[in-house]
Amino acid sequence: MGDFFKKLWDNTCDFLVNNFRTIVLFVLLLIVGYIAIKVITGIFRKMMNKSHLKGAAGNFLTSLVKTALVVLYVIILLSMLGVDTTSLVALFSVLTLAISLAVQGVISNLASGIMLVVTKPFEEGDFVDIGGTSGTVEKINITCTKLKTVDNKVVTIPNSSVTAAVITDYSTEDTRRVDFTFSVAYGSDVEKVKSIILDVLTKHELTLDDPAPMVRLTEHGASSLDFVARVWTKNSDYWTVCFDVKEQVL
């Protein structure tokens, strides 16, 4: 038994002497890699906390990044120990591909969510139109965007559909133009019609003088003369002006 332990000790000493440089490099890489993963993960987590991806979405992305770093780190360490990592890398690639295909829709929405956070075509609280769906942006999540419509419905739109759609943000500017079309019978006094409409536009307390209101005859329709009227107002007063002017002109 004593010879066995002596032989084991001798073999261990020989291994340490012959591979001293590799062992030191391995230990240093072990320490540096651990610290690097902690630092990178911490920086990434802070970035997520400062963005719209804070909370569960930010934690998910941080865990994803940490896992990828650990796997890469383990492959590098095994390679240093002389382990053939070719098959391991190939297996990891196949698994990654299989998972990505299985959750292709989720990944697409995830990438689109990141794009929305980076490009900021709108913000929470804005009134927007996304591909024909209008409402106030309630929440921009990692995979979807929630809108609350004017009739108090909550519409959830996948972020991949959001980034692919035409987006109109009505809340970006302080003012907004209200457009009207009024139709009158043939034979009506054109100047009198214009005067009545313009009088309503200029006297309304919520309309703006600059740019000045405008009324013009725009079309000779099949059974009517059509007038276009345009006036500017504050964004928050848009619908009030829209409804009031139609009633007052009538």
Image (spheres, rainbow, N blue to C red):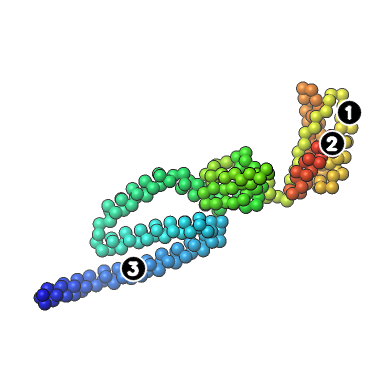
Q: Quadrant of residue 49?
A: bottom right
Which class describes the residues within 10 Å of circle 1: few (<14), some (14-19), or many (20+)? Answer: few
- Cα separation between marks 1 and 3: 89 Å
Disc number placed over residue 249 in the picture, else none: 2
Tell me the residue at 34%/49% (across/down).
Answer: 95
| Front label number (3 vs 2) | 2
Dot 2 or dot 1, earlier in sequence: 1
Disc number placed over residue 30 in the picture, else none: 3
Depth check: 59 or 169 in front?
59
Tell me the residue that label 1 is attached to. 189
Q: Amino acid at mark 2?
A: Val
Question: Could you tell me which secondary element the residue under label 2 belongs to?
Answer: helix
Q: Quadrant of residue 203?
A: top right
Left or right of residue 68, residue 178 in this image:
right
Give the position of the N terminus as an image quadrant.
Answer: bottom left
Q: Quadrant of residue 40?
A: bottom left
Dot 3 or dot 2, earlier in sequence: 3
Above or below, 119 against 82 in this view is above
Q: Amino acid at mark 1?
A: Asp
Tell me the residue at 48%/64% (across/down).
Answer: 43
Q: Amino acid at mark 3?
A: Leu
Tell me the residue at 29%/72% (across/down).
Answer: 24
